Image: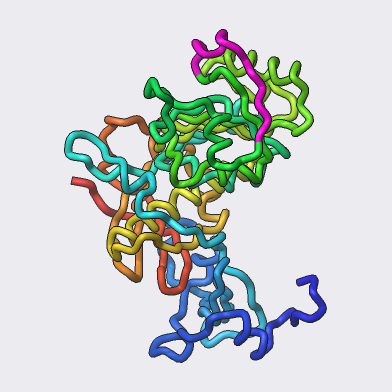
Amino acid sequence: MQNDDTPLIPDAASLEERLDTRHLRAEGGMEPFDADEVYGERCPDDDSPPTDLCSTVATRHEGLIAESGGEALGSTDDARLVGVGAVIEVMQHGAFSVNGVGLECRPFPLSFSLREVEGVWKVAAGAAQACEVADLLVAVANDAVAVVSLESNSYLDEEWRTQQPSLIAAELGVPCRVHPLGSWASGTYGLGEELVLMDRDQLPRLLDDTLSPYELTLIDLPSDATPEQLDELALVLGTTGFDEPLLNRLEGSEVWFSGHDDCYVLLETRDPALPAAVLARLLALLAGTALGELTKAPTSRVPEPGSWLAERLIATAPHWIGVLGGVSEELVTIELAALPEPWRLGVPFPKRADLTATLDVRHGTWRIASAGWSNP
């Protein structure tokens, strides 16, 4: 900690002011956890008894503070944050809740696929709406973001076609700069007739609850990009093949995003941390959706798993599918299976899960463990 007024080891007064310790007064409040599992030091196939224990001493919005113990009662000289991320709000009408698979409308699975091509990370994932991952894009983007194409049924003109993105931005009060491309671009897949540039911090404002785009393409770029550079950008976007790395043909861009049916996510990034952040967000969205359906609350606040969990999954296999297991107000379990190739709609669910990721709702922690279920 950098502030001299804040003790390195919090005292009682600072804990009472900043942290929630009410669970310590409840029966069983000092429930012990396997420290190696919580801190990401235990391999998924390690079923040996725990040797180090830890207990929750306080929780706050962005995580959980734990106290490590020794082999038995343990010492109390080590306090650190458990590997959880930020707390997010999951809306009842998110991607996992409004989409289904097949005529039976089976629950839409979590899917994630990652590959590296010439120093660029390409991700295919689901299910997420653009607004559900916008903050992750903003965190790695340049100063400006360009809306390359946008299709939505929420803002239609007199001929029942989607309004131009610039008109939608104006109606939502989002400051932007418009670069016309002309009619040549309208027939090119993934391009509209204009590029709409805005400050990256305005992106969440554009993607508010009223827009719901079923097609959206975004790319970041320097805020001082010239008209000639924007024309070059449009040319690259319109001529790059689907399997080709787009960012390698552009200078100054860090992330490209394409969302389809308000559900499927495709992105490229130079930032190696973004894929794990997306996977962690998907796990939190699926768990939050399950809690919302259980409690019937309009929103559910859930913590994202720390980067260690998503990074471990990615290190284990590049392609994953996940479905809900047990769901209660205390625990949400997501069954995860590694796939030989990216998941596609219509591919049967796996017969067996490899791992489980479990959200402990009361303590705000995530755990990962080996699984042993069969999908009938």
What residue sits 56% from the left and 17% below the top?
193
* For residue 84, side relative to residue 44 (left or right): right
Residue projecting furthest to the front = 158
Q: In which quarter of the image is residue 143?
A: top right
Quarter of the image with the N terminus is bottom right
* For residue 266, side relative to residue 294 (left or right): right
* For residue 239, side relative to residue 33 (left or right): right
Q: Which of 66 and 26 is in front in this view?
A: 26
Residue projecting furthest to the right = 4
Spot occupied by residue 280 in the image (x, y as percentages of width and height): 50, 51
Spot occupied by residue 189 in the image (x, y as percentages of width and height): 49, 16
Colour scheme of this structure image? rainbow
Spot occupied by residue 163 in the image (x, y as percentages of width and height): 48, 27
What residue sits 56% from the left and 63% below the top?
83
The region drawn magenta spans 176-189
Q: In this view, does 342 lie above or below 105?
A: above
What residue sits 47% from the left and 33% below the top?
259
Number of numbered discs overlaid on the protein picture: 0
Q: Is residue 345 above or below residue 159?
A: below
Q: Quadrant of residue 223?
A: top right
What residue sits 62% from the left and 80% below the top?
18
Q: Magenta includes 226? A: no
Q: Which of 163 and 43 is in front in this view?
A: 163
Spot occupied by residue 205 in the image (x, y as percentages of width and height): 56, 46
Residue 62 in view, yes or no: yes
Q: In this view, does 361 lie above or below 196?
A: below
Q: In which quarter of the image is residue 65?
A: bottom right
Residue 319 in view, yes or no: no
Q: Magenta includes 181? A: yes
